Image (spheres, helix red, strand yellow):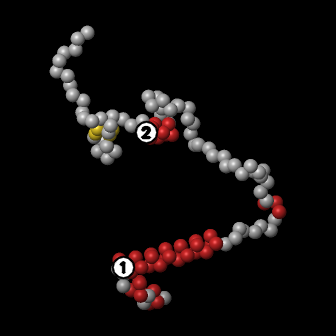
Amino acid sequence: MSNTINTLPLVSDASRRNFLKLTGAIGAAAAFTATLSACGGPASTTTGAANNTAAVNKDLTIEAGISYALSTGFDPMTSSGATPQAANLHVFEGLVELHPATREPYNALAASDPRRSTTPRTR
């Protein structure tokens, strides 16, 4: 039996190229099998007890939910939820932003960096 395995063309010449050919063939077979199973019809049941007893939605409306509450509101100073933060980032653009990779500040809407006044303030 070991002689039979060693005489297979992809096994006798073990290389990266043959490994990639073999995994490609297996992947293509899996994709083909998944495509065929997706084209099949629904599974039929022989028992009548497994029927769906949910109410039928005659208005054809879809109800969607969110996985966390929006209890923090949309105030940019106090919001802590992901949805209000995302909405605020799309609505409000800062004068100065942080680069996502380097975390260095850069001017987003600001024309230039603020200059320090050399004259003393009077009260």
Instruction: Tell me the quarter of the image containing the C terminus.
Output: top left
- Label 2 sits on a secondary structure element that is helix
The percent position of residue 108, horizontal first and vertical second, equals 32, 39
Residue 122 lies in quadrant: top left
- Which mark lies nearer to you, 2 or 1? 2
Q: Nearer the viewer, residue 111 or 38?
A: 111
The percent position of residue 92, horizontal first and vertical second, equals 42, 36
Q: Residues within 10 Å of mark 1 (few under 14, many from 20)?
A: few
The percent position of residue 18, horizontal first and vertical second, equals 39, 80
- Label 1 sits on a secondary structure element that is helix
- Amino acid type at mark 1: Arg
Disc nearer the start of the sequence (2/1) = 1
Residue that badge 2 annotates: 89
Residue that badge 1 annotates: 17
**Residue sitting at x 50%, y 76%:** 28
Q: Residues within 10 Å of mark 2 (few under 14, many from 20)?
A: few
Label disc, if present, on residue 94 of the rendered structure: none
Q: Which residue sits furthest left? A: 118
Mark 2 touches mark 1? (CB < 8 Å) = no
**Residue sitting at x 34%, y 45%:** 100
Q: Which residue sits furthest right? A: 48
CA distance separating discs 2 and 1: 48 Å
Q: Nearer the viewer, residue 94 or 67?
A: 94
Q: Is 57 situated left or right of 2 in this image?
A: right
**Residue sitting at x 40%, y 77%:** 19
